[in-house]
């Protein structure tokens, strides 16, 4: 009878192996869906809610550890971070929290080892690197401290002022030990190099560091570019550091001190200002360095002047010792009268300096198809350590167009 009854049960109602497998898959899918659904809550919900949802999650434990550390409950933070590391041994943030709890407990050597490991695991863990910067700096280890600072400032522009200030203060307080480290970092051309060099040009303390760094970088694989050096030279002039500018230039020999007028033939572009020709751009005055019409292989200064506007056509800074000097230049006049409308002047670069001397910038009656030589004599007084050599206009009361070329502008001691 039992066998007959069993046979009467429809086959579709009997649980089989396939049915059990299906039930298992359904339950697994539900559990997986639950885990997926609570992940956003685990990551973003308040810590108390996250703990209630997933008390064993290493992510939740690490978040709880960070919260306890921020609240000053050091022992709780240490315990929670250890639990998180047991479940997820390579959780950098949990490791960092544990290291900081060791530091707060006074075990700084242990904290140093732990946070160094966290910093090596992740270049993005800012709190670990920030602690290491301070710790190594207190120990006088500039190389390690600044390396971690470099890691920070490469990622975060918002902390550049603090890190730059650290470099600059150290550079002024302990230049012999700290500046070579900063120079090595700058020689790697990090993305923050332009911003840091620009920040140095804003203060007297920064300019002191900038000058020393320029000298250190000159001997390395990444010396200051012409533009970087020009910015430094310009900042020194604006700060009244005429003597400091000449000192830095002399140590770098950029441009060479052996030449009184830089780029006298207008064919050398590889020099930083103000020791390079700066040309005027204004209505009525047009100056450009271009190929000579008569000899295309030769570069020269071409000046077009309406005879009415006033201003400086070209200028550069020179350093002449006190004494008499002779200026010579090759001139070719296409039209007009440059001897009356233009003049070469030497002006003291210090405050209150006036024109010390001037010379007509052309020869009267010169041929329009040949180069001629003009000359003038200047006297440099003892209280004038640097001078501006300028080609300036001499305006008339009406327009008197002039087109003239200049080449081989030189200064030499007279006699």
Image: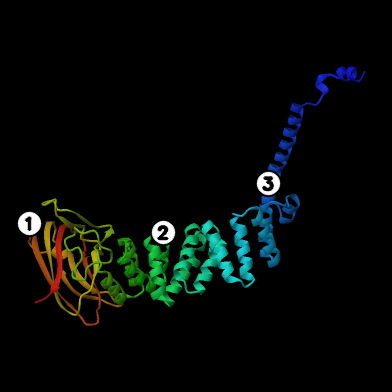
Tell us which disc is closer to us: 2 or 3. Answer: 3
SS at mark 2 in the image: loop
* Residue at the bottom extreme of this rendering: 382
For marks 3 and 1, the one nearer the N-term is 3
Q: Is residue 73 visible?
A: no
Tell us which disc is closer to us: 2 or 1. Answer: 2
Q: Which mark is residue 370?
A: 1
Picture coordinates of residue 228, whole percent (x, y):
34, 63
Picture coordinates of residue 70, whole percent (x, y):
66, 64
For marks 2 and 1, the one nearer the N-term is 2
SS at mark 1 in the image: loop
Query: Pointer 2: residues within 10 angstroms few (<14), some, or many (20+)?
Result: few
From the viewer's perspective, is 384 left or right of 9?
A: left
Picture coordinates of residue 398, whole percent (x, y):
21, 61
Check contact, mark 3 vs mark 1: CB within 8 A: no
Write the residue at 64% across / 71% down.
Answer: 105
Picture coordinates of residue 98, whole percent (x, y):
63, 63
For marks 2 and 3, the one nearer the N-term is 3
Query: Pointer 3: residues within 10 angstroms few (<14), some, or many (20+)?
Result: some
Q: Which residue has dot 3 on it?
A: 39
Q: Which residue has dot 2 on it?
A: 190
Mark 2–mark 3 distance (CA, rounded to whole Å): 38 Å
From the viewer's perspective, is 168 left or right of 131?
A: left
Residue 47 location, quadrant = bottom right
Q: Count of labels shown?
A: 3
Q: Nearer the viewer, residue 127 or 6?
A: 6
Q: Is residue 226 visible?
A: yes
Residue 181 location, quadrant = bottom left
């Amino acid at each position: 009878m039992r066998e007959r009854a069993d046979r009467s049960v429809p086959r579709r109602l009997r649980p089989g192996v396939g049915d059990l497998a299906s039930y298992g898959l359904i339950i697994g899918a539900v559990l997986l869906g639950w885990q997926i659904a609570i992940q956003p809550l685990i990551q973003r919900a308040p810590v108390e809610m996250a703990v209630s949802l997933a008390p064993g999650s290493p992510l939740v434990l690490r978040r709880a550890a960070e919260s306890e550390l921020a609240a000053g409950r050091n022992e709780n933070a240490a315990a929670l971070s250890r639990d998180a590391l047991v479940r997820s041994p390579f959780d950098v943030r949990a490791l960092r929290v544990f290291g900081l709890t060791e530091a707060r407990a006074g075990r700084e050597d242990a904290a140093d080892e732990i946070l160094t490991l966290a910093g090596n695991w992740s270049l993005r863990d800012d709190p670990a690197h920030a602690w290491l910067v301070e710790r190594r700096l207190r120990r006088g280890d500039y190389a390690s401290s600044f390396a971690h600072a470099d890691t920070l400032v490469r990622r975060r522009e918002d902390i550049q002022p603090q890190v730059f200030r650290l470099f600059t203060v150290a550079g002024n307080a302990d230049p012999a030990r700290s500046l070579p480290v900063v120079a090595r970092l700058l020689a790697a051309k990090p993305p923050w190099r332009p911003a840091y060099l620009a920040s140095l040009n804003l203060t007297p303390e920064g300019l002191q560091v900038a000058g020393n760094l320029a000298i250190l970088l000159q001997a390395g694989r990444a010396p200051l570019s012409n533009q970087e050096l020009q910015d430094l030279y310009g900042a020194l002039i604006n700060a009244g550091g005429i003597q400091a500018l000449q000192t830095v230039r002399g140590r770098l020999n950029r441009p060479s001190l052996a030449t009184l007028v830089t780029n006298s033939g207008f064919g050398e572009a590889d020099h930083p200002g103000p020791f390079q020709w700066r040309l005027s751009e204004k209505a009525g005055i047009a100056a450009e360095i271009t190929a000579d019409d008569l000899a295309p292989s030769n570069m020269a200064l071409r000046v077009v002047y309406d005879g009415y506007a006033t201003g400086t056509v070209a200028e550069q800074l020179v350093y002449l010792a006190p004494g008499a000097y002779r200026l010579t230049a090759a001139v070719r006049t296409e039209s007009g009268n440059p001897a009356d409308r233009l003049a070469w002047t030497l002006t003291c670069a210090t405050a209150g300096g006036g024109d010390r001397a001037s010379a007509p910038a052309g020869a009267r009656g010169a041929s329009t198809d040949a180069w001629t030589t003009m000359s003038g004599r200047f006297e440099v007084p003892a209280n004038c350590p640097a001078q501006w050599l300028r080609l300036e206009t001499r305006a008339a009361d009406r327009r008197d167009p002039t087109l003239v070329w200049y080449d081989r502008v030189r200064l030499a001691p007279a006699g």
